Every structure is written in C-alpha cells, then in structure tokens.
Amino acid sequence: MPTLVSHPDEVKIISRRFGAGAADIEKYLELDGYKAVQMAIEKGAEWVINEMKISGLRGRGGAGFPTGLKWSFVPKQSEKPKYVLVNGDESEPGTCKDHVIFLHDPHSVIEGTMIAGLAIGAKMGFIYLRGEYRYLLKVVEKAVADAYAKGFLGKNIFGKEGVDFDIVTQTGAGAYEVGEESALMESLEGKRGVPRIKPPFPAVVGLYGGPTVINNAETIASAPHILLMGGEAYAKVGSERNGGTRLFGISGHVERPGVYELPMGYNLKKAIYEVAGGVKGGRKLKAVVPGGSSCPVLKADELDVGLDFDQMGKAGTMLGSGGIVVLDETVSIVEFALRTIKFYQHESCGWCIPCREGTDWLKKTLTRFYNGYGNKKDIANIQYLAENMMGRTFCPLGDAAAMPTLGFIKKFREEFEEYLEGHRTEKALITTEEMIGAAH
Amino acid sequence: MLTAEERREIEIKLADYPNKQAMSIESMLIVQRHRGWVSDESLGDLSELLGLSVADLDGVATFYNLIRRRPVGRHVAMVCDSVSCWIMGGERIRDRLCSRLDTTLGETTADGRFTLLPIVCLGACDHAPAMMIDGKLYEDLDEQRLDEVVARYK
Amino acid sequence: MTVATIFIDNAPREVNPKQNLLHVCLSLGYDLPYFCWHPALGSVGACRQCAVKQFRNEQDATGKIVMACMTPAAEGTRISIADPEVVAFRAGVIQGLMQNHPHDCPVCDEGGECHLQDMTVMTGHRQRVYSFGKRTFRNQYLGPLVNHEMNRCIQCQRCVRFYREYAGGHDLNAFHLRDSIFYGRHEDGVLESEFSGNLVEICPTGVFTDATLKHHYSRKWDLQMAPSICVHCGLGCNITAGERYGTLRRVVNRYNHEVNGYFLCDRGRFGYEFVESSLRIRHPLVDGKPATRSEALERFGAVLRKGAVIGVGSPRASLESNFALRALAGPDHFFAGVPDEESRLISAMVRILRDGPARSPSLDEVEHSDAVFVLGEDLTNVAPIMALRLRQSVRQAPMRLAAGLHIPEWLDHAVRETVQDAKGPLFIASPYATKLDDIATATYHASPDDLARLGFAIAHAIDATAPEVIALSPELETMAAKIAAALRGAQHPLVVAGASCRNRGVIEAAGQIAWALCKVGSPASLSFTMPECNSFGLALMEAPPLSEALRTVRSEPVSTLIVLENDLFRRAPANEVTSLLRGVQHLIVLDHLGNPTTDAAELVLPAGTFAESDGTLVNNEGRAQRFFQVLNPSTDVQESWRWLHEVSVAAGSKSMERWEDLDDLTATIAKEIAAFGALPKVAPPRSAVGKIAREPSRYSGRTAMLANISVHEPRPPQDPDSSLAFSMESGPGPVPSSLIPFFWAPGWNSVQAVNKFQSEIGGALRGGDPGVRLIEPSRESVWQYFSAIPPAFKSRSGEWLLIPVFHIFGSEELSRHAQGISQLLPRPYLALNPAEASLVGAKAGGRIKILIEDSQFELEIMLRADLPRGVAGLPAGLPPFDGIQLPLFCKLASVGTEFSARGVL
C-alpha cells in the first residue's frame, strides 16, 4: 500500500478515514459509517438532493457539473429501472486520486452509491473500476460483501421494509475513452467503449436504456460526508460556487508527491511549493499541467491562481481531474506535448474523424518535430489540426487532445521554434506502430 | 474447451447482469486470468456459451488494451509510458527491464518467463515511475527496486 | 404534414420539422456532404462531415458549428452552409479522411461512382498536406459476391450499421480502435448475411465492391443502363442493369420507395450472371442443331400450319410474352405453366386479396406494420427483402418509447439505446426455424396443417363468428389468443403467408385472420409471397394449370406444344411431363438457358432475359412494373413476345398483326383482359416522352468500341418499344420515374445521386414511385369465412411428410446458374428431426435412402431439431428432385437396405 502523505493545510473530509483501516466495515461503522445513508432513508430523496445542491459539490471527474442538479434531472417516474453508476475509470494521465478512496475507504463509495440511488429512486448501482485497477477489486468486493452481510445491501436494507439496493462491481479492460460517461455505459453493457450521442443524457436514457446517474468515484464518496456535515457546512469549506474540498494528486518534479485534500479555491502555487514541498532538488519550475494531461499548461509565472473550476477557467486552463503535474526545467515541452498526444491518439476510440485522424496526424507531426525534421508550416498545421478538433468531435476526447496541444504551442512557442533550428534528437521515440503491436 | 472453473466463474458473474452481452468483457478477462490470453478457440467457446458471435466478442476484445489476443509469457509486465512516469524516469526503468530480460516491449523472453508491454497511465502518478506485473502494482521504482521486484517472478 | 420555416444562409425555407437539418437540406437540393448518415440508417454523428453553422437568432453573428445530421430542423432554426469557417471545417474533415486513403482510384472498382470522390470534390479539398505514411490492412476473403479492400476505408461505420443493426447480421464487425479500426469478419469466410451485397452500395468508397463485377468490370460511366425488375422472386424489386460490349455487367439497386427502397438481397443483386451463363441459348436450335433465324421461323411457321397448337406459359415470363402465346394458341389453348396445386394456391391468394376486405400492402407498408404474423413462410429465403423490411417493422412499436422521450426517429443510436432489445410483436409460425426467428416474439414450428389450424384459431380468437378450431391443444389456444391480442391491439397489423407450404389451409387461414381483423374494425394488411416474379400476373390471366394441358392433349388432336420460358421438368414429375410431350408431334420452346425441356424440343428459340427484353411483371403486391431492355443483343435473342408475334404474322395470323411494339401490345392486353386495364399506365408510352439516354454523358469509346469491325461508327440501334435510347442522346425535361435508367446528377456520381430524384429524401421518387397496383380489396362485403379447417397432423408410421426447405441460393431456377451464386448452393440433403433420424438409424452427415413415389434417391442427412415430428425436409427447387411436387409422403431406409415391396421399412 503506497504511503499516505499529509499537510497541515489539508481539510480532511473525504480523506478523514484514510489510513484508519476503514476498509474494514467495523472500523468504518466506528467512524460514522453508514449513518448518512440511514439519514437519507429517513429524510427522503428531496432532502438529499437539496443538501447536495446546497453543498455546491461539482463533479470531481473533471467537468465540474453540479451534482445535486444532475441528480435532480432524473425523472421521478420511469418504465425502466434506474441505475447509479460509479465511474472509477480514472485514466487521465496525472490523475491518481480515486484509487486511494477505493483502497482506503471503499465503504464511502458504497454508501455514496446508495445515497445517490435513494435520491433518484434507483435500486441498483454499479461500481466500475478501470481494468488496470483490478487489484482494487478485492478490496471493493469485500466491502460490498460485508455490506450485504450486515444487511446494508440487498432487500429491506437496514431493516426498512421495501427499501432495496444492490451493488455490482465490474472492471473494464483498459480504455481511456470509457472514462467518458456514455462510453462507460457501453462498456458496462459489454460493448466496445464508444461514446453515445447526447442528448439524450444518461439521466433520461442511460444504462440499458434506463435513467442513470453516473458520477465520478470521488463525487459519490463525497455524498455521505456532505449529508453528515450538512450541505451548508460543506459549501463553506470551499470557494464561491465551488463547494467543499477535493483530492489533488500532485505528481512530477516535487519533493512530496501524493494525494492531498485541499479546499476548493486553494492556491495552486501554495499547493506546489508548500503542500508538495516545492520543486524536487531545488530545480527551477518550468510548467504545470494543472488538472490531468488534457488541461492547458501553465507557466511558472501563472501559478498564483485558486484551484477551483471557475478560477482555473479564468486562468485559461481547467481544474480538470485534480491531477497536478509539475515539470521542472529539464523537461522538453516538445517531447511532453508529443507524449501527451501519443496518449490521446492511442486511446481515441476511432468513432469520429477529427479526433481519429487528427490525433494521428498530430502525433506524427510532433514526432517529426521532436526528431528535428519539423518546419514552420508544421507549427501552423499542428494548430490547425488541434483547432479543427476543438468542440467539433463527437465526445470530449478530441478536446482533451487539442487543448493541451494548443496550450503548449501558445505558451512555449519559442521552444518549438528551437526545434526547427536543425535540432536533432539523439534517440527517437518508439513508434506507435510498435506500441500497437505490443498491446495486441 | 472452457474449463469447469472458467465456466463456473462466468456463470456466477452472469447473474449480475440483465443479458449475456454484458458479460463479454468479463468473460474474456476470466479466460485470460486462467490462460494468460484469449485464443480464437476460447472466443469460439465463449461465443457458444454467451450466444454472441465470435465477431461480437473479438470486436470487444480488440477495443480494450488489456484483453490479449496473442499468447504471453508466464508473467506479464506492463510499464507505464505516460507523462508522469516519463518525467520521473520511466524510460530508464523500461530500458533496464528490457536489458535485464533481454527483450523489448511487445515481446516475450526466449524462456517464456516474461512478456513486456507498454501501458498507458496506471493511475500511480504520484508514485512514478510505476509498472504492473500480473496485475500487481509496483510504484516508486528505481533500478534497484526493479531488480528486486523482477527477481520475485520466476 | 406540418411545415417549419428555417433559414438557410438567410433564405427562408419550408421544411419537415420531424427531420434533421441534413435531411431537409438534401431534400431542398443543397449539396451538403455526408458519410455516416444514410436515409435508411439515420444519424449517428460519427463523420462530422455535414457540419453547418447554427445561429441563435438574427443578431447572432458568431454562430456555432453543429452537425446537420444531429440537429433537428426546428421552426426558426438559422443555419449557414456557406459560412467560411464551416466550409473550412468540412474541408478539414475530408482532409482527415483522405489522410490514409490510398488514392488508388484508377484501379478501384468504385472509381467514377464513389461517394468519397464526390464529397472530396464537393468540399474543395484539393491540396494534399499530409506527408506521412499511411496505415495499411490485410484484406479478407468474404466469399464470391463481395470483395474487400480495407485500405480504402474511411471508417464511416455505415457497413456495420447496415449489416448488424439494420440487417441483423453478426459476422461482420468493427475491430480495434483509433485510426486502425478494421471492418471485416473475425476470420476469412463467406459473409453470412443474405443482404451482404448492399455493402457495395452502403460503403461510400471501394472497401466493399461487387466481386462478380470484377470478372467483367466496367466503369459506371461506361455502362449502358436501363431500369429493370428483379426476376428472382415474387417481390419485384427494382433494379438497374448495366451492359457493356453486349454483355450484362452488373445489377444495382434502383430506388423505389414503395417496393425495395435502398436495398436488394444477394440473389437479386448477383443472380444476373445467369444471363451470361454457358447454358445460355443465343441462337435458334432446330432438331438440336444451330439454325439461322429464318430457318427457325420457317420451321415454326410450317409447324403452326400443321394443326392445333397449345401454349404453356410461365410465371417467370412477362405478361406480354404470356399474352402473346395466349393470343397465338387461343385463350382456350393457353395454360399456366405451373403445377395444379400451385396454380390453385395462387388463384386462392389472388381471390382472397380481390374478394376480401384486406389489402395487400407495399413493402414500405410492410415495414411500417406494428404487429405481424408470418404464417408458413421462410421469408429470408423466399422473399428476402420482405424479411429485411420486417426486421425494421419490429422497431415500430418500441419507437413510441423514444417518441415519448422526444427522441426523434432519425437519431438512430439514441433510439436504439432507448429501445434496447424491445421489439414489436412479430409472430412466426413456420414448418422449420427461419432466420427471422431471432426477432420474433414467439415462434411455432409445425406441419403445414397444424400451422393452418393455428391460423384459423387466431381468426376465431379475433372474431368469434369465425369458425372455431376443434380439438385445439391448450398451448395453441393460448398462443392463438396472444397473437390475436397483439394483432388486434396494433394500428397497422399485418398477416404474411404464401404458397411455400403448398397448403391451401395455410393460405385460407391467413386470409381468415386478416378478414377477421377487418371485420372487427382493424385496418389489416395481408401480404402473400409469390413463388416467382410473375406468378401473380400469370394468375390474373386465369389460365388453367398444367394438368389441363395434358388433358387437352389427350382429348383433342393437338399437333404442337409451345412452351414459353419454362422448364416443365421442374413443374411436374418427369413421367407426367414425358407423357405430355409424347402427346404432341412438335415441341417448340422459347427460353434463356438450356434445360431438359429445351433438350426435348424440336425447335428452340433464344428468348430474351430481362436484360434483352421489355415487359411487365406483377409482383406479390399486385403491382405491375415494367422492365426495359438494357442491351441490344447482336445474337438472335429477342423478347419471346416478339418471336411469337413474328411467327404468327409470318404464318398469316390476323389477330396479332395489330400490334408491333410494346405500347400496341400493352394496349391490346388492357383491352382484352379486364384485370390489366391499367397496364398501359405502368410506364409512359414511347410517344409521350422524349428520348432518354441509356448511356451516361461520359460514356467513352462510343466511336471506337466497334472499330475493329468497321471504322464507321454504326448507327445506334433503335428501340421501337420505349423512349430509352441505346445512346447518349437525351431530350430535355425530367425523366418519368419508371424510366430512370440510372441515378446521376451533376456532382453526384455514386448511387447516392438518388437524393436528387426524390420528392423528399427517403420518400417517393418525384412524380410517384414506379408501378401500378392492379388489384384492390373488394368494397362489398360478400366474402365469407372459410370453414374447411384441416384436422391436426398425425405422423404416420414408416412415412414422413416431405416438405420443401427454401434456400436463397438454390431454390430459384435462374440465379442458380450465376457464376458467383453457383458457388454457394447447398448440396442436396434430407433434413430430419434428430428423433426421427434415430428411428431410421440415421446420423448427421451420413446418408439415407429415400423413396418418393416411384423415385429413389440417396441423400446426405441433415439433422434439424426445429423440424416437426413426422416431417422431413428437402431443399426446394434443387436438382435432382426439382420436379417432385411437395408435400408428399416418403419412405426412408438406411443405405444398404432395400425398400420392401410395399415400401415399408
């Protein structure tokens, strides 16, 4: 089990049971476990949704959609069963927070799922873990089994007549695209993980055609804490329109990488220099990718910004999935851009043209660039290709590939231009063809 | 032929879903856990068991990175090649692994002990560089730790 | 229809608000490029090619790029197609598509009729910027009909959407992901779907191409084309046939909204190769020896003068040819060339449709039925396109679920996700399992008599005044009630039956159900399949069946028998045919391919196939449709009716002198037989329309193609029968829908040019779809319920009821001789229920002896658990037992044993 980190600036809400052995149901119960869901059963769906709305909780997967509002969209009446899905397909490079919850506090995910179920009138929840997280499944499955054994799941839960809730766990098999909510539903249905068209949104037509709420694991795990402390108290912790706290995974060239729970709006510079101990080895900070690899890069002089959805947006980037990657002066931005696009190219599902062909072309152009054979037109073409993807692809994967690419060129154009000057990279990267061959 | 154990595991999990299509990914993973990979023959067997066409199953199999349609060695090591691991020296680890085992990514060692594969982000960015062997995650790797870890897999 | 006003580049346009922007823009005639969308498949938003810019209101100058196919054409919508930003985006999409495309147009079969080419030109992508390597794939062998070249793929998803989602196939899929998505099979092998040929047209480029065309390839622009009708089943799908250098090169779909829509079955698409089969008769044969045209006519005349003539017509010959023979022999001496039982069954079907209140629907109406009962038919193998239409019909009822959530019908994947596996009511009662069973609400496999009993029970359950079925099992009672309830609850219920079971009870039961529905106020449709392309038309001539010909020969002095496009050995047991032939001195046969009947003839005349003829066929709906000659043969081949006309005039007959061309002939038919009163309206007469070119304006080599014979360009052949010219010559003015020789419009070289010929995309052709319905249900309620309900089938000890099992490839006479299809024929076999097989000690793959009447065969055993007890199946229409008229009882014996004298084991 990886070592947990901590810092005095942390506000431990979702992480309060981390390291306390709460994967054990008895310990979880001791630490106020399964109280929130019983409150929810008692006070009813409307109360739950209202508290969630007041809490100002916004989706922790990256899009930041208000959770209470999302739950309220689910129609009360439905011919088909309703479902709650937990998106544990944490796959965006730089993001490393959800697995900590599954590992240290799986019951909070279960309890959150039940609360969401009560809120929307679902009797069934699915917890979907990405294929690479199979090692967490044992922990989660045990937690689910323990909850069943206690009568917290199944028929007449907590002895309440007619209150039923079931949870099924499933893993994927390796596909970034499946982190997109509709692609995740496809995958859960045993299909190729290609996204669905929206609208209809999952709240109307979701899993197996039934109304479905799908939330990121951290979002779901926040729900019990919000009910316990009250939406208002939770909201107060964060910044304006950004309630509560959030887990930030700080990685890269910092002294103390790790997952920290910081209030929304916490200063990014402080997070890097104080919470994570500053740049490793005292080297100079060159750039920060602030919310997972799809977020436009920030330069060293742009870090004085609050970590919430709105402030990051104003700074020209995104809060994203809370994965902060710190790059020191030794990192080649061109190579970083190339590695980033390689990831998106590799994970493009192939459904729509601008993303499928665009990521491939971008990858090839950046590879050529990196190898020292680029020309000025290539820079323009990279921008053109990325712009042709922005907002125009079928799902957000196109944006996720285009945004950082555009950001790198915008912020570090001179570095790209350096590569034009007969720069020759000693060692070319392995080709994607080799990678395809390797994976299949 | 599916073994009784494989069949049993599939049938248990089948109860969780409203239809057999939903089992396509999991059933292939079950077979893979037992055999290391999913052969054409296994696809045929699963096709019969689940009432899905082989093309249905293979369409799914080839979509996902972790379903392997080629034979692998006794152990499968997957080395993260995404950005966080890369800036933390992931390539050093990869190169060390390759040279120690005298093979390259995508290949299996001559003695059939290891298959090395690249993998996109393992979600262990704060403990980079990371790799996974037979589903077990290894973090904060350096050369020495890598050697120790690899030595555990015979 | 409600109309919405939207603004396209600031111009107000009236559109159908139930549709999406792409659909309405194309309907209005705008050139908006697209790939993944297809009018029959709906929108999925994958290719991003049809992007337009949408503005919130008049003041909005920025706008937002949206996909036209995914955006409803709602009232007040403001869009721009010409906005520079969106124009650039569309060019960018094409640039992406062309990135990996091999640019192998010169050697690609699709070249010149490629949607990708058209769209590339349309978007203005001229300059190749991409300078990297292209991804490549390994191609697969997909069988003799469809060729695979994956490198050309632009991953638009249409192939799998058609094949899997629309046509219900399972063996084609998308594999892998990113830019290496592969469309194909899991491994090399023949595509399993009966509709695989549509991939050729569904694919916007050359990934899937017509493998049969490869053997005699020609560019579309070099083909001389004509509108035609498929002759390979009774549905009358509209086709376009293409010729070059005097040979038939291919068949493609010809859109007819009411009949086949956008699709053909593989028998219809690839059966055409029989025209160029080595069995083809191209010159007259006199006494088995090649003869000249004049020798043949001379012999014909001489024979005619010798004495009385009888004529045997054909359900695969045109109305015109049948009528010509009827005129020559005289109505009293003209016989339908079909077996008695089949003739009776078809007459029964026609009578039920004419005398009763239930209407025969068009295939489009079949598709829009919301509850269907199929009785006794294996539609996928007998009337394939009806099966494809029914596959869509089961989506009708669940579609209401999507409508309730305001999800438009065209938003295809959203609808499918909403509907999931829900299917509307489709019940199939058939003697064996069919390929539509997978979408059926319930199926019932039983002997023909038992099927009929279920049908009558359903009718009784719908209307208690319909006769009750005595001694019905409780299970069947329940099933009948369930089916009756589904049909009664539907807005557009449909009953489908036909002659496949060769059982009158089945047909009457189907009629009974439809009538009962009508009686209780439901607008029921009743669709009968027909065994052959003109079975319906021949039945409307009301000629007596084949046995009457034999009786006439025995009772009257008949000197000559003329057989029209008919192999009598397929119509009756060999001994009966032989005795008929022995009863006359002279046998004259007009046909396309050599067969046992032509072998027996004194005189054989080379009859034109659909490709060399003009004529009219009546499909199972009762719709008369005209086919036109596509090529002018350099041989002696010509329409049978023309042969008969020529010889009768030569022999001095006055009755046929009056007509010389097709228009004369159809007018005569209309006058003489009331049922064909509307025949002249099936297509405009030659005089009414200016010339219509059979050759596209880019037709090449016109002056050179015969230069090896003479450097003087020959005068194009004249067509006395239609406005269609054997040249590039075309008059001004629109082409009537029945005469469209090919779909082409400036900028639209692919089949998708059909967009430009439709009143609304996916709707009727401008000026109405081709074809004229010859029958309508009776308005008078003179009909009465049938009361002859057969008793329950009892299996006999030591005997098995032999029923026909239909095969899309094999059961039909002509397509069997097509080069591609001939590779896919089943081997003769006997199908048995495993329980029955064990009774006779037969094992799968083993052989068995079968005694049918006096004939013995030894056949391979096929075990089919879906076959009812006491019943055995024999592939229909397949030699060597194609003359045996099923159903009948047979005896079985294991190989090596003998049938005892009494024939019992």
Image (cartoon, coloured by chain):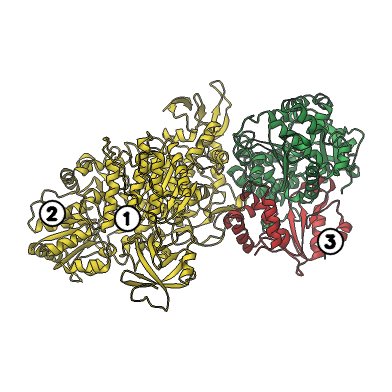
Judging by the rendered image, the residue that carries numbered circle 1 is C243
Which secondary structure lies at badge 1? strand
Q: Is residue A437 visible?
A: yes
Q: Quadrant of the C terminus of chain C?
A: bottom left
Spot the residue most to the right.
A8
Specify the amino acid type for callout 2.
Answer: Gly
Which one is in front in this view, the residue at disc 2 or the one at disc 3? Answer: 2
Within 10 Å of disc 2 (Cα), the crowding (few <14, some 14-19, many 20+) is some
Drawing shade for chain C: yellow
Please name whichever residue, A396 or C218, is drawn nearer the observer in this view of the structure.
A396
- Comparing C853 with A195, the one in front is C853
| Residue at which label 2 appears | C330
Would you say C112 lies left or right of A91 here? left
**Residues under labels 1 and 3: Cα distance?**
69 Å
x and y percentages locating residue C274 in the rendered image: 33, 61
User: Which amino acid, mark 3?
Assistant: Val
Which residue shows up at 42% across the image and 72% down it?
C848
* Badges 1 and 3, same chain: no
Q: Give me the chain letter of mark 2.
A: C
Tag 2 and tag 1, C-beta contact below 8 Å:
no
Question: Viewed as shown, does residue C822 lie left or right of B94?
Answer: left
Residue C220 drawn at (x, y percent)? 38, 52
Badge 3 element = helix
Contact, CB < 8 Å: mark 1 with mark 3?
A: no
Q: Colour of chain B?
A: red
Residue under label 3, please give it. Answer: B150
SS of the residue under disc 2? loop
**Residue kind at label 1, given as amino acid type:** Glu
Q: Is residue C697 left or right of residue C329?
A: right
Q: Give the spatial CA distance, label 2 vs label 3.
A: 96 Å
Rendered position, C245 above or below C847: above
